[in-house]
Image (cartoon, rainbow, N blue to C red):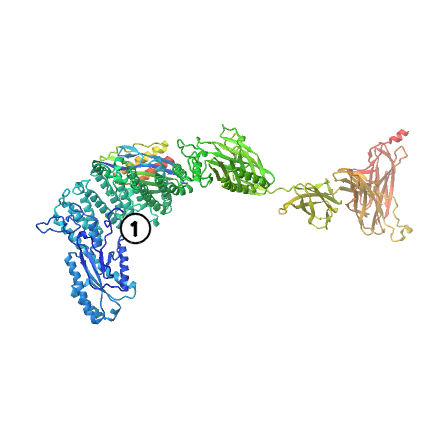
Amino acid sequence: MSAAIPSVACLGVIGRNNNPLHISIFPSYDPTANAFTPVRNPLQFSLLLSSTIDVFDLRSKTSTASGDFGLLHAIDDRLAAYGFETNTGVRMVCIVDMRGRRVEAGGSAGTGGAGGGPSQSSASASSSSAAAAAAARASMSNVGAGLRDAELKPVFRAMQSATG
Amino acid sequence: MDGYPLGSLDHNVPLIVVSGLNSDPPEQPPKANGPGILLRSDLPPLESREANFLQSYFQEVDERGTSWTAITRDEPFRVRIKTVGRSYVLPSRRARLPETIEPMTTAPILHSPFSPLSPSSALYPDGLINAQWIKKHQEAIPSIFVCFQTLISDPNIATLGDNKLKTDLNHIRATLVESGYKTRLVVIILGDEDARKLTADIIQDRLENIRRGTGLDPKSIFYVTPQESPSDLKRVMDSVLSLLYTTSIEYYRDLGRHARKKRSRGIVPQPTVPPTSGTSQTLSLSDWNFRYDFKLAIFAEFRQEIDAAIRSFEQAYEILLGQDVLDIIPSWSPRWNEARLLADIISIRCLRMHLWMGQTSMAVRRWQAHRDRISEFVDARGRGTNNYGWQAWEARWAMVMAGLIEKTEVPGLGPSTMTIFLQPEKTLIGERLHPWELLHHTGYWYRIAARHLGARKALAHRIPDDDRGAPDASPASRLSSKAYRYDTYMCPPPHEEYPLNGKGVNHAQLIIDCLLNARGQFQARKQHRIAAEISLECAREMATIGAWNEVLGMLRPLWEDKSFRSEWWLDISEEILWLVRRAAAETGRADVVVATDWELMDKRFRRRENWHYDLSKSLDGVTLDTKPSISISDDLASSFLSASFVFRAKEGRAGETCLAQLSLNSEALSVAAPVTLSSIRVEFEGHLRPITLVHDSALHIDSAEGPISLAAVSLTEQLGGDEKKDKGESENEVEEGDQDEGEDKKEDADEDNKDEKEDQLTGRCDLTLRPGHRQVFEMNIPLREPGEASASTLILSYKADTFELDYKFSLSELGKVTGWFVQGSVKPRLSRPNGHILHIQPRPPKMKLRLIEPLEQYYANEPIALRIGLYNEEDDSANVKLDVRIIGKGIPRFQVQAGEHKREVDATEEESQVTDLTLGHIASSSSLEASIHLDPAPAPTVYELQIRADYHLESDAATPIVQVLPIHLNIVNAFEANYDLMPRLHPDPWPSLFDYEDLQDVSEGDVVPAKGLTQQWCLVCHYASFATEDLDVIGLDMQVTSVTPGGRCRVVSQPEFSADGMIVAPKTMYEARFDLVAEKVTLDDRHPVAIDLALVVRWRRRRSTDGETGLVNVTTMIVGQYMVLGTEPRVLASVLHSSQEKTGLVRLDVTIENPSSHFLTFGLAMEPSDAFAFSGSKQTTMHLLPMSRRTQTYRLMPLVRGVYVRPGLVVRDKYFQKVLRVIPTEGMKIDKDGLLVWIPPVQETEEKSN
């Protein structure tokens, strides 16, 4: 028996003029092929990231207290986008694949943190995989049972330190 | 939710049948289920106004009853109401035996026609349950049968009527009881107008009578008194319905109880007839339990007991998906799909109830759980999830959720709330939720459905051809294999899904419908980017079915509002652009094709392999009727070319030229073909004519290497006058052109002419732009009109064989920093903002104003004449007016003269002017002279003259042009002088007090001869010319301007000048001596006399050039006031040189004057000296009477020659013991030590003569 746990599928940094600054894509575990492949193609990820701008805009009218927007929206039952806005207006988006990793019933993360993804820039890639690992660790405590907004905090922290 | 059997998903609410409001005949139930039970009343139906109103009101209530929204506590009832005529047919309670069955020995046990036990039922022998059963309760068997009746008010037949009513109701009641249904009977008696006459007691009695006669309980008989208004009636009826509602709930509770009782029996009932066909399998106990649980749940739902309903449903669901029911149904059996359908129905009903209770996250969870459970099941027992059927169901399942959210109107999730997803309900708040478990709005659900539909389509397209044929065309073996391989649950079999021939399921349309639904939801919540993304997906789907017009319609808004492009989502924009291009190519939209090609040449986009990237080939393969002229602008399509326009300077002058640079940078992909523009047009805002650069390949710039090349373009001005010629040319073109295209061309030519009507500048150069190359055109623009000019638009024209393109750039972006390119440098220099704006100063007037033959210096006391020359250097004759304005102190009278026009102004204090002196026309390149004559200025001063020519050209009378000539006149004194008044010895003897005759008053005419003392003075004037040139001094006069009364003064000698005067060179001192004699009229006058003197210089300018002598000017200089004829004694020394004597003997006279009235004694002492010998008293005393003078003479024999000697002469006032100063006269001088006498040298002539 194995259970799916969340993993980071894509990290995006969006500039204050709504322009993409950086996109990292990470593969997810595909049980049918028993391999790691990204769940969407880069174009689709671009579209997913751009669609979060709407949510940012919608949400920023009501709450601007802190930069953490938490869950922006779930794209479907598998992918969900979380957002963070820095005080300079740069937005960070983390698209989480809720079934990106598989954990054996024993609990050892056989595949956790593997992959690392096709690194586009070493700094952000390392930070992103660290973020992914953080997310994976966070979700270990309660296998396969969702994700709290707060659990994305280390991801955004890692992104901020990598970009800042 | 289409596809689920009718009624299976309805929101179950109590059914009430209302009879007697109309006269409709009863509906007949389907024959198959037996004849049914007829409830019939012979009484006539009510056909009053109230009855009609009630009927429509009940319809309203019925409609409300079909709603899927949650029932709140405030809602008193929600029922379905069926209004029928006087009779109603209930379905028969027992199924009939099929006629084919042989008669049995024992009486058969008959069951409900909907039961799987009855052979006539579709479920026979092993079906579980179907929608028919739910439908029976929802639509056929009412919980309450309501009879509307009326009371007969006529007292004669009242009893008869009441009895009739009683029998009627008894009949119905009996029928109902006989039928076995537990339907309640309710009578509502509507009082009519006549009933108002009846008293309440009578009505009460009659109602009681009827009730007792029919055995109805008191709650089942209502009397409605006639109401005033429909709303009152409605209110009354609402309260009746609320009461009935509780009765109904009771009815369904009974049914539920019955079902539970049957379940708890734990017996498997036997079918009426044992099955003989098929597997001859019958339902097991679990199956029956499922059936009862399902029924219990449905009855609970009728009662709106949601908790109970969910509990029963979940129990039924567990049984169904447990190991005893679905697990043992073979997947090829139709019962398998029926069971799946039941699972779906249960799930949907559960979801709906979760939504009603506001358990949104629970609903999502339930939704996911069902999907996961079924997928596991299908994988394990069915045909797997890797086929189109499964994807079809997944899509359906997502759509079900979307439909549920819409139909139950989940609060807080409507489009107006702008909510994207709902927060979880309170019970789940602490839990770790999946993000998807927060209920998102329906857009997301539709999108998921579309995604699954896409997968379905992909899988359908993978069906092998063998399976796609019609079933009758393929062998039986294949048929069976198909049945095993394809999941046809709620979707068509493969030969219908994707047939070999003919149309199958229109997947694309399904997807598009779904996406459009989703898009509407996203748009309503202002999620425009997702909406755009969905549009893109939609367009892709449309492209697959070749609906190119729709593709274009879908994407064009995205392309036009520059979604993604403006925010640099390049991969997305690229995708859109290629799709737009393809659609445009397919639909023959040449403009869009070219515009997208233009954009896609930009190197920021990824290069597509095997693409030509050549603009001239853009329309290859596009079918077009005519050669299109395409016009696009930078706000529609971005460009691979970037352009900037900059003026060299910020300011320029009309009539002059200004350098400007147009820089075009091609950022095309490196593989792209060079683009050769046919022309470039720069348009300006403000007063600058457009510039057109035309391609000329002959002027090729050899700059293959550098990333930048600079070309100087010479511009030629094309004035409006050239229009005619151009028109002629274009007309020729028309004639040469084909007849068919003649008309089009004519229009083009007309347009061209319009353009050419305005003046423009044209230049020729090579307009080929290679990728990655910057081409800079430098041109010198002639400026014509003043004002501000800014480059506004740039139009690039491109002409290919197949099309013509104009690309319009906006250059007027404020604050844009542009630089100036120089040869050999890639980066621009001197970057400045707003380089495209030029301020053109007004055109300088070409009328030249000049002072003709100006004099170097003007002097006071001379008349000043200024000659002003006006030279018209304009191209046209001008009409001129002259203004002269003088500012200064003490402006003299002056006169302005030009031809016959003359104007004179009197002297004023500070400012004086002549305005609008008409000078008339001055022809081009001719001149006119005006002169200004100023009267002599009395003193040196400064005048500012402003001469202003206002004129306008004959050709352009509207534009006033002004030329101004300022003249600064500094008037100085021509001469300056200083003066020295020196005493002289008057030779005449003083009058003697004792001379009687002299004292006698002898009057000769008016002049009274002076009788007083007389003194002679000499005024020495040292004057110099302060002029800058030689002047002629004609004469010098000394004027005695005033003398104290009692005194007289006259000039006795003055310098003489020749008629031509004397040339006075500047800055040279000249001396002039004037001898003055001052005298007093009487001797008695003791007061000193003050005299005021003035020096008058008469002079003129030298006119060496023309020889004519100028006017003589008179400059009077005030000498000042002198006091003469004082009363103090004075000592005057005078010398007399003896010219005859070679010895050079000198006589020195010392004259002491005593003008006082005292007797004075002076001591004279003469010191001996080495320089001379002298004769005379060495020491003597002189006594002077009042008013007398005495002279002591010394004779000096100088021992030296040619020097001054110093006679040591001391004159002392004996009384005051005061040394008097000896005043020298001619030939002497004095210094601080005393008198000096000049001893002239020995005269040479004399020596020679000797």
Q: Does residue B1126 sit above or below A118 in this rendering?
A: below
Q: Chain of mark 1?
A: B
| Image side of residue A63 versus residue B118, left or right | right
Residue at 18 percent across and 58 percent down: it is B38
Residue at 57 percent across and 39 percent down: it is B728
Front residue of B1146/B1102: it is B1102
What is the count of numbered marks?
A: 1
Element assignment for label 1? loop
Front residue of B348/B527: it is B348
Residue B964: x, y in percent? Answer: 66, 44
| Amino acid type of the residue that numbered disc 1 sits on in the rendered structure | Glu
Task: Name the residue furthest front.
Answer: B739
Residue B751: x, y in percent? Answer: 52, 42
Residue B816 in sight from this viewpoint: yes
Residue at mark 1: B409
Residue at 90 percent across and 34 percent down: it is B1141
Residue A67 in sight from this viewpoint: no
Task: Name the residue furthest top.
Answer: B705
